[in-house]
Amino acid sequence: MINCVTLCVALSMVVGCTWAAATVDEIADQNRSGPMLGCHKRVFTYRVSQTDNKGRECWDHVSVWSCHGRCDSNEISDWRFPYKRSHHPVCMHAGRTRSVAVLRHCHPDADPEAKLYEYMEPKSCSCQTCTSMDTSCEGPKQLNTDAVTKIFQIEEEEIESEYA
C-alpha cells in the first residue's frame, strides 16, 4: 500500500479547499533533486497532534514545506559604536499560504474539527532581514523552551495507529 499524506490547501476562505496527495517517494525525490546551497523550500515531516474540547486526541505524521538553507552575511568595520555594520539575512518565507492536513489517527469519539490541523507553508523562500512581526528571530539562547510547544522532526519512521 502506498503511504500518502493528504493535505487540504485552503486557496481562500471564499473558494474552499483543494485536495492533493503526494507519495513519500515523490517528496523524497523532490528533496534529493532540489538545490543544496542557498535558500529554498524543503519538505520536513513532523508528528502533530491536537485535542478537541473534551481532550480526545487526533494525531498523524504531516509533511510540510518549509524554508531551509543559508544566506550570505557580512560585517563591515565602522568608527562608530558598535564599531561594525552588520548584514545578516536569514532564509525565510517570501509569502505564505494556509494549509490543512487531515489527521488520520483519531479517538473514536473525537470531534470532526480535531481531525483538521491548520498550518502555514511558504509560497517561496528568500534571504531577508528577519522581522519579528511574523517570525521568531531570537537565537536558541534567547528562547524560553519551557513555554513553547515542541514539535519534533520524524526521520523515515513507520506509522502505527493508536486507534486501529
Image (cartoon, rainbow, N blue to C red):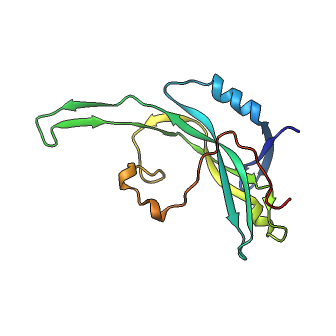
50 over 120 or under it: above or below: below
- 12 to the left or right of 81: right
Does residue 142 lie above or below 84 as drawn?
below
In the image, taking residue 41 as reference, residue 156 lies left or right, namely: right
Residue 34 is situated, as x and y percent measured from the top left of the image, at: 61, 25
Q: Return the residue nearer the eye: 22 or 133.
A: 22
- Which residue does the image show at 50% across and 61% down from the upper left? 148
**Residue in the picture at 66% in, 55% down:** 48
Q: Nearer the viewer, residue 126 or 43?
A: 43
Q: Nearer the viewer, residue 50 or 87?
A: 50
Q: Quadrant of residue 28?
A: top right
Q: Say whether residue 66 is left or right of residue 105.
A: left
For the question of whether residue 138 can be seen, the reply is no
Q: Residue at x 55, y 57 (%)?
A: 150
Q: Nearer the viewer, residue 79 or 103?
A: 103
Residue drawn at point x = 79 percent, y = 70 percent: 111
**In x, y percent, where is residue 5?**
77, 44
In this view, which residue lies farthest toward the left? 79
